[in-house]
Image (spheres, rainbow, N blue to C red):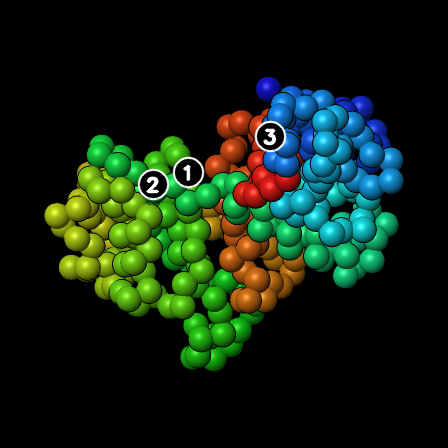
Amino acid sequence: MKQTNVRQFFQQFPNDEACLAHLFNVRFGQGHECPKCKREAKWYRLQSEQAFSCQWCGHHIHPMVGSIFEKSRTPLQLWFYAIFLFTTSKHGVSAKELQRQLGVTYKTAWRMAKLIREHMAEVDGDAPLGGSGEVVEVDETFVGGKTTGRDWRERKTVVMGMMERDGDVMLKVVPDQTRGSLMPQIVNNVADGTEIHTDELSAYNKAIPVDRYTHKRVNHSQDEYVGPNGETTNSIENFFGHLKRSLKGTHNNVSPKYLEAYVKEFEYRFNRRTTPDVMLGELLSRFPDLGA
């Protein structure tokens, strides 16, 4: 199915009331058991606050509690539209763009973007990659502005990528390219029995547990990009190229402090590249805390 377009979005969410009703329906719904009187109830919309009341005991439930919208004074429809923008842009959305599109202050737009990225990461999760018979490509890249001098590596941030062949990607911001930084990420996030492809970085030599994985290397220093047995890191390198072009074109510069949230945003969209139509509904219905 195709992604929701702007016209369809505003037909579905024409105002704040429609957005609040959507949150109530996906998180609770009519017939939801009242946490106070323990009876299945019909819930009535309260006009005095953004809440619904139990038909039996009058207990209130607040659909926005436990979501990224909680305690926000920004209209709910603007929140929903901001999430819509994040799902339809391949290159990300800057806070300045949200400020222009939504007509809010830059401070509000920046906070909204931060919470939306964190929500995307929560929904995407970190399910293990690979498994028996599967191939996972592992590589790292340096992200940051232009630098000069021999210490340029110290002024950039290392992003590690693990990509299952024809599958999902997982990105982690790591301190450096040492064995101590890279290997725990592989062991914790790649399933046993996986065939791992890396470049010739010495940190991987004799470090990937041979009793858990099959390790194959491609030697870029010898102009080798596909090994004799099909080993390659081309897919993760292509992804890194898109990531860095997008970060530079959309955000110009990203602080190392917040970089992981930005790369997780790109991870979320990539992992739904074949089903882009699910993103908006998923982000507007899945929340880590369904407290009443």
Mark-to-mark CA distance, 1 and 2: 7 Å
Q: Residue 252, position in %: x, y?
A: 65, 61
Q: Secondary structure at mark 3?
A: loop
Q: Earlier in the sequence, mark 2 or mark 3?
A: 3
Mark-to-mark CA distance, 1 and 3: 42 Å
Identify which residue, 166 or 60, lies in the foreground: 60
The amino acid type found where label 3 is placed reads Lys
- Who's the residue at 23% across and 50% down the image? 217
In the displayed image of the protein, which residue is found farthest to the left?
211
Identify which residue, 245 or 272, lies in the foreground: 272
Q: Residue 147, position in %: x, y?
A: 53, 73
The residue indicated by pointer 3 is: 38
The amino acid type found where label 2 is placed reads Leu
- Who's the residue at 58% across and 36% down the image? 286
Q: Earlier in the sequence, mark 1 or mark 3?
A: 3
- Who's the residue at 38% across and 41% down the image? 127
Q: Which mark is residue 168?
A: 1
Q: Residue 31, position in %: x, y?
A: 65, 21
Crowding at mark 1 (Cα within 10 Å: few <14, some 14-19, many 20+): some
Residue 50 falls in image quadrant: top right
